[in-house]
Amino acid sequence: MKKNYYLIAISSLFATLFAVGATAQEKRPAHLGFLYPLSTNGVRAADYSNDVSIHALTGLSGGERGLAIYGLGGFIKGNATGFQSAGLWLSVSGEVRGLQVSGLVNQARQAGKSIQVAGLVNRSKEASGIQLSGIVNAAASFKGAQLTGIANFSHQAKGIQLSGILNLAEEVNGIQVSGLINKAKTVKGVQLAGLINIADSSDYPIGILNLITDGEKRLGISVDENLTQLISFRSGGSRMYGIIGLGSNFTHGDLPYAMETGIGIKLSDSKLFRLDMEASNVWGTNFKKWGGYSRTGIRLLPVLKLSRNLQLYAGPSLNYMNTQNPKGRDLAKFKMWDKNQMNTFKAIHWGFNAGLQIRIQ
């Protein structure tokens, strides 16, 4: 019996999906049904628009102007305004204005001033409002916000793209925020990624690696007041850049391995000089019992351009550090404040950073 029930429901879904109807010509106050075409509008359901539609399994209409609820799937051949809800799938051939909520997929030709909420996928040719989904949002163009657990896709994006893994767009006028990767061609705004930003043009990429075609990349070696030596890679746009570095400290044998991540911004630039400000975090460790060393700080770096691609820099830094290393006090030589609590040494201190770098793009 259950198999027959499921077969009927699935057959109704497909019948509703492929039903042919034009834009609604007549209006009705209510449309009640079990599954298409077993409803008060029958096989002509696509010829009517309704104020209220309630269907136990699937439903078809020419348009909806208020409340529409479908147990499994709803298929609207015209425009929809108000609230539409379905357990699995909502499909609107025209424009949506209001709120769409489905368990799996929302699909609309145009979502104007609307909110689409889906367990899996929101898909629209044009969207203006909010797309919220568990896996994917896709729109040829959108103005507003795309929020998803996995990936956002758009050709033209105006507003914010927020995803757990990937944002992909051609033209961005706003913000891309991703847990891993942002990719675009032209960005007028900010890219913020947990790992990589990719673009032809992006002035404000914030990430560990920023592969910007018209930006710059620099490879350098640096040393700080604790004689921690790092080989660092800086990459970004014309204004902001990311920092990643690996190195060591031979002076403090308890912390022989070092790593750095950070972001920087170019404050000024001329033919012979530039001025950078950077925020970074440096870790030192021996991968053993002490839990290492962490220093977070801001530094101001005047840069002397020795040639077109060779640059020398040096400048002060203000840092907050904490460590469980017994020699922690030796790692904060110019202290403004310090505290030793529960085998952890903390301090705010001055420092410096100097280095030589080569511009490779």
Image (cartoon, helix red, strand yellow):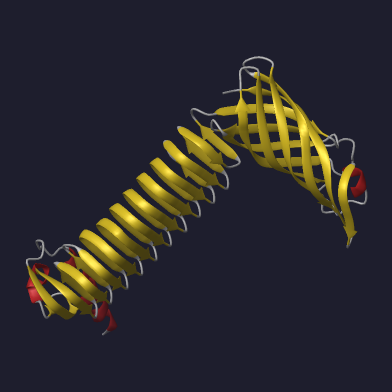
Q: Residue furthest bottom?
A: 1
Q: Position of residue 299 (x, y in %)?
A: 73, 37
Quadrant containing the N terminus in the rendered view? bottom left
Q: Is residue 68 above or below residue 302?
A: below
Can residue 245 be seen from the camera position used here?
yes
Identify the residue shown where x is 16% and y is 67%: 63
Q: Residue 6 or 335: which is nearer the viewer?
A: 335
**Which is more toward the observer, 201 or 166?**
201
Relative horizontal placement of residue 71, taking residue 33 as reference (left or right): right
Residue 264 horizontal/vertical position (percent): 64, 37
* Position above or below: 25 against 210: below
Q: Quadrant of residue 234?
A: top right
109 left or right, relative to 198:
left
* Position of residue 312 in the picture relative to residue 327 (left or right): left
| Residue located at (42% from left, 59% from top) | 135
Q: Position of residue 133 (x, y in %)?
A: 40, 61
* Residue under the point 27% across and 71% down: 84
Quarter of the image for the C terminus: give it: top right
**Percent position (x, y) of residue 145?**
41, 55
* Camera-nearest residue between 355 and 70: 355
Number of marks in the rendered image: 0
Q: Is residue 36 placed above or below 179 in the rendered structure?
A: below
Residue 12: in sight, yes or no?
Answer: no
Frontmost residue, 224 versus 277 = 277
In the orientation shown, which residue stands out farthest toward the top?
Answer: 307
- Residue 319 position by quadrant: top right
Classify residue 225 as left or right of residue 307: right
